[in-house]
Amino acid sequence: MHSLKSYRISFVLISLALCFAWLLNISSGSVVIPFDAMLSVVFGGKADIDSWNYIIWNYRIPKAFTAALVGGGLSISGLLMQTLFRNPLAGPFVLGISSGASLGAAMILLGASLISGMVSFTFINDISLAIAASLGSFLVLLVVMLVANRVKDTMALLIIGLMFGSITTALVSVLAYFSSAEDLQRFIFWSFGSVGNLSGQQVILLSGVVFLGLMLSVLSIKKLNAFLLGENYAQSLGVSLKKSRLIIIIATGILAGGITAFAGPIAFIGLAVPHLTRQIFDTMEHRVLIPAVFLYGAILMLLCDTIAQLPNSANVLPINAITSLVGAPVIIWLLVRKRKMLF
Amino acid sequence: MSNLKKHNIIVKDLSIGYKDKTVADNINFCMNSGQLCAIVGVNGVGKSTLLRTLGKLQPKLSGEIAINRKALELHSSFELAKTLSFVLTEQPASKNLTVQELIALGRQPYTNWIGTLTTEDKQQVEESLSSFLLKDLRYNKCHELSDGQLQRVLIARAMAQDTPLILLDEPTTHLDLYHKVQILKLLQQLSHNKQKTIIFTTHEIELAIQLCDTILILDGNENPSGTPIELIEQKHFEHLFPLEMVQFDSKTGSFKVNK
């Protein structure tokens, strides 16, 4: 409550950083496009080589946009979970939402050959994969929500989420055991994560999903702040526990489930970004944290995707590996330097 | 009847506890505004349960609770947030909040959908900060505070919520004698200056006798209540603990260990 104004400079800086990360992301890729040519294309001009226009407008800009949405959305879902579960180690993976999405994807990619007599292979495309992954994450979410209404203790809920994660992972490995090499490869590629293979329609759908999740988060800001005191205090401040918890869980599920469906299970962004953000924005006020975490997540994801592109070759490193390589040391560094992870 | 109007909390034949277990019953008392009231009793007799029941954090088993002449169950959660505030034994979930942020959260029942503080809200926060001697600590994080300071912050938050009734669960545990007295003195000032009813549970019977206007003794039987002097005269403190261990000295209002 240093008054929100004192964070204005930080917000300006972080927005500039986002623009920079975005341009950097667009400038890197398998085809070398000079930075000045890229700038002129982005700002409405024409590049000397026609294919550059096409690559930038039809491939790189949608990809950068997707990366920003994915990073920001996952980070917000991590922030919501950390506040709701009063646990600095909560993230989209902990509730089993990402695992649920993996199960859905595995059903399509691996299970299809088991029931190949009934389903033709042409049925397997990106859209059905996205739908299956969404369904998987929402199925887990639904079960967790049912349990949430019975269990008052959020720690128990957290452990239940972890158990669901284990169950879905086990089911996935059973499916993997019985599936063919090609199917397995497809699934593994999905689980590497990617922000580049989305069609225009999918990008629009993803934007809608992230927008909906953000709206629900913004509407919950006051309740999230009350939850910082603990549930009993929140209740004594007039917060309806069941209703607010449900809205926050739905927001989390929409963000984490929807994004995982389109971009694959992307690790550590949701967990690490809220902590990183608090290094700059030293506050617990969600009015500050929600926009800040979204911007920070977008920046980090753009940078990770840029690193994945760096070799300037046709090969793109798996984004999931990059986020883990960046995210896990950050968590360790925070733990060692700060001794305790406060949230 | 005119006397009854001043009572802003009335409890009749209340029994409290959980579905399968009654913790305490036959609880009757009424308390006036501007009074500091202590609930005393041995461990496990149901002091905290009573406090939580009075604040609707858990349902009562039977009986009546009326706050401001309206049955507790008829208060909406929104109304209740402006009627009573809590200081619980549990620590705030996030200790990364600053003192000022935490106290400002007490203004939630009055702020808009996103929690913007108006000038009046800020004034209330300032007043709470200064009443509980926290002005110098306002930008400190809660994990940097001592137990006594944190307790003052939590009480200041309850004060900022600006409710006629404040319920505190063992506000003096883990504190040394000086800080115990400091907290209770501040509570006494708050109740008398702002005409608030402040009810707290405590094991500090001797301090409660000196500082409180009313005491409720939960003894699992009659559960007598009254002013400290009345209760001493009626010899209610004598039977609070096993006689062979400690004895109450009614002249000094203190307990003596039997050697």
Image (spheres, rainbow, N blue to C red):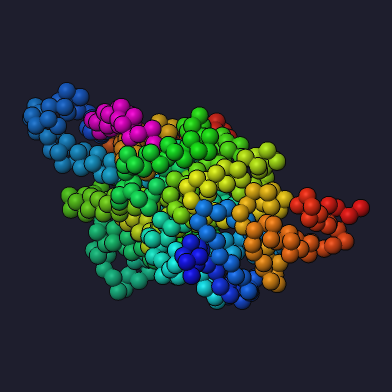
Residue A137 appears anywhere in the view:
no
Q: Residue at x 58, y 53 (%)?
A: B36
Q: Vertical placement of A213 versus B54: above or below?
A: above
Give residue A332's position: percent from left, percent from top.
53, 36
Look at the picture and state if A45 lies above or below B241.
Answer: above
Q: Nearer the viewer, residue B139 or A273?
A: B139
Q: Foreground residue, B227 or A79?
A: B227
Given residues B135 and A153, the one toward you in this image is B135
Residue A163 x, y percent position in the rendering: 52, 61
> Which residue ends up furthest to the front in the rendered image?
B2
Q: Nearer the viewer, residue A280 or B257?
A: B257
| In this picture, residue B136 sits left or right of residue A16 | right
Q: Residue B44: x, y in percent? A: 69, 63
Magenta-colored span: A1-24
Q: Which residue is pictured at 55% across the width and 76% down the height?
A: B62
Number of on-image labels: 0
In this picture, residue A207 sits left or right of residue B78? left
Q: Position of residue A100 (x, y in %)?
A: 41, 60
Residue A114 image-quadrant placement: bottom left
The residue at 50%/45% (across/down) is B193
Q: Is residue A20 magenta?
A: yes
